[in-house]
């Protein structure tokens, strides 16, 4: 096949502790080696890509993505999601089972994996439904889903409510070495709330969700994980209180992990001012204090991964009175740029940020992706960390346009994305660039 | 799991000199072996149709079944009749328990009838022990809740001993719904007492790690659990385990925890296949395995009658000598 030589790049590969300028060689779709000693020779017939000092990292691994397919193709399809992923430097996505039908059947798991392979642009790691139909009543066929290739088990944005069911789920899944992913929100406390309980929600007249809804669920499930020996992960944590419970559990040696998403470390509840439904999330955007707690937990390692929490919704789902509007935002295209905002403000180092976007989520999912180890599949992201661009809803690659970051200037632009050595994205000279 | 420890006043130690058989926990090898020897002799007499009919002549045995059972009740009834006892079957449907009588009122009534042997099955753990404290009859536990089913474990032991010549040094895999199984608990007590290694195999919802406190090995992977086993003892998976969410589906259960030929081949060559019945073919056990030459399931039923004869004989000896 072909040979590609990346020259003049800053290679960042946190899985192997690499952060050095140099060259990287790809042969036949796999990483053939890195060269940081300043050698000159070029292999015969190699395609040479001059990075001009840009960063070359593993393709990003996004551990929390919802796709509309099957069932909600008007929101997003696998191929439109693949376009969005490639534009965001993402080469591996873990897909939530909350489509229609829910991914509670081994054939659907295999279908999603195959459709990812067919796209040529992304690896799809399917989550299996934790309960049948993601309805929160009976356990799904976790063993058979696991065998078919489901990487972990969750009901997506629906919290597993009865404590007995969560206990059974953690216990049963542990027999297969499978991870259970919880949406950390106590449903009866969240009720019909749509914003974080506090001064802003009170002023806007919106039903509030207390931060305790998150911490109570996290505390309960940590206790159940301790009881069952189950492997527990919390998706999109957003409160200082909840994160502190996870920090303490890990200090006790429990295998409890968590991820968060850009809205929770880049926005706070003020983003919903004037009833902006594009900033309506579940869990809701929190106070500035909580946002800072999320940043601190990213820096100290308590949070294991940053996921886009990509949730495609069309305009009709969002252009409704605030309480009736859908939650969630599209996030794959902006994942890297918003994360780099935390590098530019000094919260994270660049290798820390890349680790949170590559090998750390890959490790949680048991995936070999997220590394530049010689012999690994050449999934690569080339980006210019200082180059700015403007997020424009309506012009994002992919179908879903419900971004909370509309009109936001971001520093850090993906220049190119390679999947198994094949280029799947190339930034246009002006496309999306800031004026 | 849910068993409260026996109250101190209860005749919990079903030793040589107690008149009840409430459980096998605490029994010693020198109590178990002679009972099995006696059962063995009854097995031979049964086959030659030469059972002495006068052992329990004039004695009354009441089968008091608060839970439906055909096999166990029939087995006890046959055992009693072969030894010459008058056998009465009382099932809950006909009894005054349904009219609101308490368990202890029932006990008092039966006591007044000069019953010699009371064979009790009840859905509540500890119910036979409660009855035993209130009646003059010898009480035999024919299965109480999730606690014990001593005659089942004894007949399993007799079957194993007849085939493998010993009850010591064996590796026995007990597979399936151990958490809710009185059969498993009695077998664990007996087999560990006799010096064998017991492995419990099943999903963690049915084989919780707390069972490890009973001195057994826990396996959540069927292949690991069966490897090198001398005996594979399958348990029945009740349908209600699925409706209560402990197991996602019958097909998933069979896929990971069903006994098929491929898995059985991981055990010792000619390992025994056992099942207390009634079987769910295609759920916990494949038909071809249940009917294979390694299966001793029918022999278990035969030994059941012999073991129960031995128990009835043994428990009433001091009473008959008096």
Image (cartoon, rainbow, N blue to C red):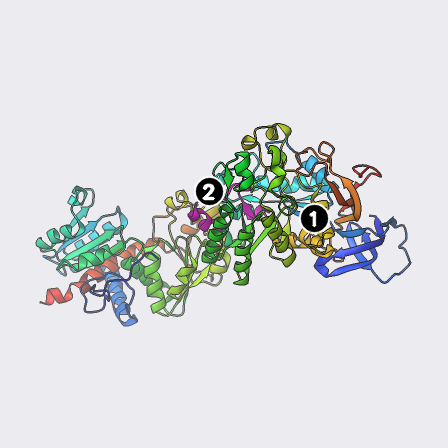
Callout 2: residue from which chain?
A
The front one of B58 and A237 is A237
Query: Is B92 one of the magenta-colored residues?
Result: no
Which residue range is magenta in the image? A146-172
- Say if B305 sits above or below A70 in the image: below
Residue B8 picture location, percent across and down: 22, 65
- Please give the residue where the numbered disc 1 appears in the rendered image: A339
- Please give the residue where the numbered disc 2 appears in the rendered image: A189
Query: Is A149 one of the magenta-colored residues?
Result: yes
Q: Is residue B139 visible?
A: yes
The front one of A49 and A338 is A338
- Whole-number angstrom distance, CA of label 2 to CA of label 1: 31 Å
Residue A376 picture location, percent across and down: 73, 54
Residue at left 11%, top 58%?
B57
Kindly identify which numbered label has been placed on residue B208.
none
Say whether residue B258 is left or right of residue A256. left
Same subunit under labels 2 and 1? yes
Which part of the image, by quadrant, shows the C terminus of chain A? top right
Residue A424 picture location, percent across and down: 77, 41
């Amino acid at each position: 096949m072909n040979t590609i030589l990346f020259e003049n790049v800053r290679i960042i590969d946190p899985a192997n502790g690499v952060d050095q300028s140099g060259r990287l060689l790809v042969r036949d779709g796999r990483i053939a080696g890195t060269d940081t000693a300043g050698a000159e020779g070029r292999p015969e017939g190699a395609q040479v890509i001059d990075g001009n000092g840009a960063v070359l990292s593993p393709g990003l691994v996004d551990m929390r993505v919802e796709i509309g397919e099957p069932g909600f193709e008007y929101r997003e399809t696998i191929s439109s999601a693949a376009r969005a992923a490639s534009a965001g430097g993402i080469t591996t996505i873990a897909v939530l089972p909350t489509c229609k039908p829910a991914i509670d059947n081994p054939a659907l798991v295999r279908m999603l994996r195959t459709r990812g392979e067919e796209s040529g642009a992304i690896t799809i790691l399917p989550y299996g439904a934790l309960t049948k139909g993601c309805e929160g009543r009976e356990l799904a066929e976790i063993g058979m889903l696991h065998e078919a290739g489901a990487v972990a088990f969750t009901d997506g944005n629906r919290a597993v409510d009865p404590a007995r069911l969560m206990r059974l789920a953690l216990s049963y899944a542990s027999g297969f070495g499978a991870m259970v992913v919880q949406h950390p929100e106590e449903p009866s406390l969240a009720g019909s709330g749509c914003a974080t309980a506090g001064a802003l929600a009170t002023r806007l007249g919106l039903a509030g969700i207390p931060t305790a809804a998150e911490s109570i669920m996290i505390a309960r499930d940590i206790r159940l994980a301790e009881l069952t020996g189950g492997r527990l992960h919390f998706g999109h944590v957003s409160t200082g209180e909840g994160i502190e419970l996870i920090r303490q559990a890990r200090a006790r040696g429990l295998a409890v992990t968590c991820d968060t998403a850009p809205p929770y470390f880049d926005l706070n509840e003020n983003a919903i001012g004037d009833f902006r439904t594009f900033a309506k999330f579940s869990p809701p955007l929190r106070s500035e204090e909580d946002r800072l707690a999320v940043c601190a937990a990213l820096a100290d390692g308590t949070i294991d991964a940053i996921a886009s929490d990509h949730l495609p919704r069309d305009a009709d789902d969002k252009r409704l009175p605030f309480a009736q509007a859908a939650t969630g935002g599209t996030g794959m295209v902006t994942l890297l740029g918003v994360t780099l905002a935390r590098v530019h403000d000094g919260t994270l180092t660049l290798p820390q940020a890349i680790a949170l976007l590559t090998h750390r989520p890959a490790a949680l999912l048991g995936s070999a992706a997220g590394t530049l180890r010689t012999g690994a599949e050449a999934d690569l992201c080339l980006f210019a960390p200082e180059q700015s661009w403007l997020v424009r809803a309506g012009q994002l690659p992919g179908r879903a346009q419900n971004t909370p970051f509309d009109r936001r200037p971001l520093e850090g632009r993906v220049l190119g994305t390679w999947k198994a050595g094949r280029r799947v994205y190339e930034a246009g000279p002006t496309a999306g660039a800031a004026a | 799991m849910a068993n409260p420890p026996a109250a101190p006043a209860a005749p919990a130690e079903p030793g040589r000199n107690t008149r009840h058989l409430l459980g096998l926990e605490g029994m010693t090898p020198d109590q178990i072996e002679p009972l099995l020897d006696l059962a063995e002799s009854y097995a031979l007499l049964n086959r030659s149709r030469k059972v002495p009919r006068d052992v329990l002549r004039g004695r009354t045995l009441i089968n008091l079944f608060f839970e439906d059972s055909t096999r166990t009740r029939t087995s006890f009834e046959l055992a009693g009749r072969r030894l010459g006892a008058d056998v009465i079957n009382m099932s809950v449907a006909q009894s005054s328990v349904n009219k609101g009588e308490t368990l202890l009122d029932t006990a008092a009534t039966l006591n007044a009838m000069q019953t010699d042997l009371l064979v009790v099955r009840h859905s509540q753990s500890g119910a036979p022990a409660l009855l035993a404290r209130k009646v003059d009859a010898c009480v035999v536990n024919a299965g109480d809740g999730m606690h014990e089913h001593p005659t089942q474990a004894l007949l399993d032991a007799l079957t194993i001993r007849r085939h493998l010549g010993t009850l010591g040094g064996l590796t026995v895999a007990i597979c399936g719904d151990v958490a809710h199984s009185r059969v498993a608990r009695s077998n664990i007590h007996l087999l560990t007492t006799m010096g064998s290694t017991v492995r419990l195999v099943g999903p963690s919802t049915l084989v919780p790690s707390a069972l490890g406190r009973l001195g057994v090995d826990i396996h959540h992977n069927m292949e690991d659990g069966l490897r090198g086993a001398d005996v594979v003892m399958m348990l029945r998976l009740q349908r209600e385990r699925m409706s209560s969410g402990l197991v996602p589906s019958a097909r998933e259960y069979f896929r990971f925890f069903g006994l098929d030929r491929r898995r059985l081949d991981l055990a010792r060559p000619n390992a025994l296949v056992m099942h207390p019945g009634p079987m769910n073919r295609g759920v916990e056990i494949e038909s071809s395995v249940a009917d294979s030459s390694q299966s001793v399931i029918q022999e278990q039923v035969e030994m059941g009658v012999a073991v129960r004869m031995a128990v009835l004989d043994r428990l009433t000896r001091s009473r008959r000598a008096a």
